[in-house]
Structures are given as C-alpha cells and as structure tokens.
Image (cartoon, grey):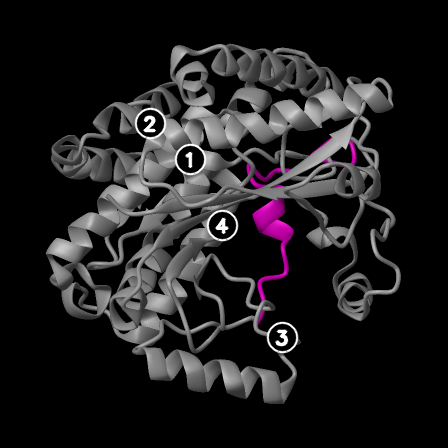
C-alpha cells in the first residue's frame, strides 16, 4: 500500500453558520494547526500512513481537539462546506498582515480563494512514475470533485454550482500542461517563476500537482487538490481508496498513462481535462463529461461506477476494499452538495441547511471517535 496524508482546511464559526476568524488564537494554542491567508479558516495536516484505520483516527483526533478548544473560547464550532456559504464574501480578513505573499493573494484574488478543501497526498518517490501518475489523475480529477462537491451556496444564495469553490477558484497559471517528464516540469516551473505567473513554487493551483520537500527538483508525492471539503472522514477515505487503487493499477500497468492509452494529443487532453472540471463544478455527479481515452460522452456518476468496479479487485487484494465500498452510498444518495440542494428543494433555506449539517457532522465525529478502531489506536 502507498502512504497517504491529508491537508484539511476548515472554517470556524457559530452553530448558526456564521463564519468567524479564530485562526490566530487556534495556531497559538494548538500544535499541528497552521493559518491560511484569511483568518476564517485553519488547516491541519495528517502524517502519512498506509493503513486506513490509522488515517481515520488521524483525521478525527485533531478535530476533536479543535472542537474542545473552540468550546473554551465560547459558543464556536466547525462549519462544513467549502465556501463562505452564508455571508462574508465581501471582504478579506487577513491572518498575517505582515506577510507579503498574503498581500499579493488578497490584492490579486480577493475572497475567491477564501475556501476550505481537502488535499490528498499519496507517496510516489520515482519522479518519472510520479509524472505518469499526475497525468492520469489530472484526466480523472473531475471525478474526485464530483464525489466531494460541498459548496452550492455563497453569501447566502444558491449559486447554480455544486462546487462554487472550484467554479470560482482562480486556477493558476491559467494553462498547466500535462508534464511529459520531470525535466519538463522543472523547466516549466522555472519559466513561470521568471514570467511572474507563479510567485513561488507553491503558487501552482491546479487540480493535481507533484509535491516534495524541494519543488520542482526533489519530489516524493502526488497532491490531489481539486476536492471540496469532505466533512465525513469515512467518505473521504472512500475517495482516497479509489485514488490509491487507481494509482496501484497504474504502477502495475504503465500503459494506463493517457500519453499511451489515449487517441488524443497532449493539448487535446489538457483541454478535455479543463472542460470536464468546469462541467463537474456545476453538476458534479450529474455532469456529462468526455472520457480521456477517446472523448466519448459519459456521465460522471457512470464513470465513477466504472472505476469502482474496475478497482475493486485491486483494493480487495491489498486489504482495503471495505474502505472503498462507501463510494456506493455517495453514488446512491448524492454528495454533500446534492443532499443540501435537495433540502433546499424541500423548502429549507441555505442557513437552515448549514445549521443541520453543522450538527450532523459533529455527531458523526463523536461516533467515529468512540469507535473501537480509534479507541484501540489511542490506547
């Protein structure tokens, strides 16, 4: 099995859904949490592990600690979703006014980047294998957004997107190629830094990117950045299991590389991936996409179902198929955005939906923390 870790961005606020910036207090008081440019969300990172049961506890434990600290400050909680759902999109609340990079972000992008998301990191040490993995995942990244979409509201309104976050997020640079090799990635990155289209090596905001301790030179993992915040850790692990099983298939069969198995050119593949991301941001699992192999039309949910069936044997042989199986529930009941919009169609307001979701995810975390798996690992 491959090593996996998460970067988790979350909003803090009140049980009524008002998002309030508390990151300066959180970072000062709790180890393992870091600030984002805007003070209304905070990030924690899990260490890389192979075992899914350990990952489950590493996801839940920091949230429990954060919830306890928020309660000590007042009537504060964690708020699900990936956008400023009920308001606050009119101004930026700087977490570090002296940071020049944060100044650039605020002045260039405004609150379009004040989002919460999940970044999934999977360890792959060989740089050329990593580039091949990035090519495949770039073409299938829209499917992971389709499963994770959780931002249908912004400033109190239904936006028309299932992922308002990805629909409005300023992907930077605007055109990112499918990297042909590690050297291509190095030269392209150096060129962007010289042109100023990237301010630093971290300023590559695409659906997937190579990552490591000294980018672009020393790399050791693939980072999938497209996912909205997945509030339920079990659902997040199911999405991760699909990603890992797919990467394992690629490791065993390098011909899954789109440069080998597709009838499209590199430029056509890039354009197809970008167009599929736009479609999924609007309709998630119900979006009509184009398959990277031959550009045939396919619904996102049908493509996910195909991959689920195709990767099941791999996941079972490696012992983690039980963590993959919750994908069927997402396909059956919808992702978070689709469930929230269904509540709106039944007459609830966005605020009522968010308030219900706040309570539901707190109860879910409580149940997971009491699970025998987490209890045994804590002991």
Mark 4, residue position: 226
* In the image, residue 30 above or below residue 273: above
Q: Residues within 10 Å of mark 1 (few under 14, many from 20)?
A: many
Q: Residues within 10 Å of mark 4 (few under 14, many from 20)?
A: many
Mark 1, residue position: 147
The range drawn in magenta is 154-173
Q: Quadrant of residue 194?
A: bottom right
Pair 1/3: label in front? 3
The residue under the point 82% across, 27% down is 18
**Magenta span: chief secondary structure:** loop
Report, in whole angstroms, how far the alpha carbon at label 1 lies from the one at label 3.
30 Å
User: For numbered disc 4, what is the local secondary structure?
Assistant: loop
Q: Residue furthest front?
A: 379
User: For numbered disc 2, what is the local secondary structure?
Assistant: helix
Report, in whole angstroms, how far the alpha carbon at label 1 lies from the one at label 4.
11 Å
Q: Position of residue 280 (x, y in %)?
A: 46, 45
Q: Residues within 10 Å of mark 3 (few under 14, many from 20)?
A: some
Q: Quadrant of residue 350?
A: top right
Q: In the rendered structure, find residue 200 and report the number of the disc placed on it.
A: 3
User: For numbered disc 1, what is the local secondary structure?
Assistant: helix
Mark 2, residue position: 327
The residue under the point 24% across, 47% down is 246
Of callouts 1 and 2, which one flags the residue occurring earlier in the amino acid sequence?
1
Report, in whole angstroms, how far the alpha carbon at label 1 lies from the one at label 2.
8 Å
Nearer to us in this view, 60 or 166: 60
- Is 235 left or right of 297, judged from the image as shown? right
Pair 3/2: label in front? 3
Q: Are marks 4 and 3 in contact (CB under 8 Å)?
A: no
Q: Position of residue 61 (x, y in %)?
A: 56, 26
């Amino acid at each position: 099995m491959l090593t996996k870790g998460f970067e988790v961005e979350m909003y803090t606020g009140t049980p009524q859904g008002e998002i309030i910036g508390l990151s300066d207090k959180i970072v000062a008081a709790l180890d393992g949490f870091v600030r984002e440019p805007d003070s209304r969300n905070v990030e924690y990172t899990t260490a890389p592990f192979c075992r899914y049961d350990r990952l489950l506890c590493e996801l839940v434990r920091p949230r429990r600690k954060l919830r306890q600290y928020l309660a000590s400050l007042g009537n504060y909680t964690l708020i699900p979703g990936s956008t400023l759902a009920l308001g606050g999109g009119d101004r930026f609340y700087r977490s570090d006014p002296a940071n020049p990079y944060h100044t650039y972000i605020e002045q260039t992008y405004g609150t379009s980047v004040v989002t919460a998301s999940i970044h999934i990191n999977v360890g792959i040490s060989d740089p050329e294998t990593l580039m091949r993995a990035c090519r495949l995942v770039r073409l299938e990244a829209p499917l992971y957004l389709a499963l994770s979409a959780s931002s249908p509201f912004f400033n109190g309104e239904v936006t028309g997107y299932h992922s308002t976050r990805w629909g409005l997020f300023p992907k930077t640079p605007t055109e990112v190629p499918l990297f042909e090799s590690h050297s291509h990635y190095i030269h392209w990155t150096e060129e962007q830094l010289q042109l100023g289209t990237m301010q630093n090596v971290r300023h590559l905001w695409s659906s997937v990117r190579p990552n490591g301790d000294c980018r672009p030179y020393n790399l050791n993992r693939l980072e999938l950045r497209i996912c909205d915040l997945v509030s339920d850790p079990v659902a997040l692990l199911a999405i991760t299991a699909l990603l890992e099983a797919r990467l394992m298939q690629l490791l065993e069969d390098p011909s899954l590389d789109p440069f080998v198995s597709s009838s499209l050119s590199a430029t056509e593949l890039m354009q197809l991936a970008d167009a599929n991301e736009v479609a999924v941001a609007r309709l998630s699992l119900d979006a009509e996409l184009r398959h990277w192999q031959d550009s045939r039309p396919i619904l996102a949910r049908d493509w996910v179902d195909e991959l689920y069936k195709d990767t099941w044997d791999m996941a079972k042989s490696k012992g983690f198929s039980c963590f993959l199986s919750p994908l069927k529930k997402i396909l059956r009941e919808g992702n978070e955005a689709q469930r929230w919009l269904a509540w709106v169609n039944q007459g609830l307001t966005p605020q009522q939906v968010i308030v219900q979701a706040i309570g539901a995810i707190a109860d879910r975390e409580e149940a997971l923390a009491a699970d025998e798996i987490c209890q045994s690992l804590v002991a």
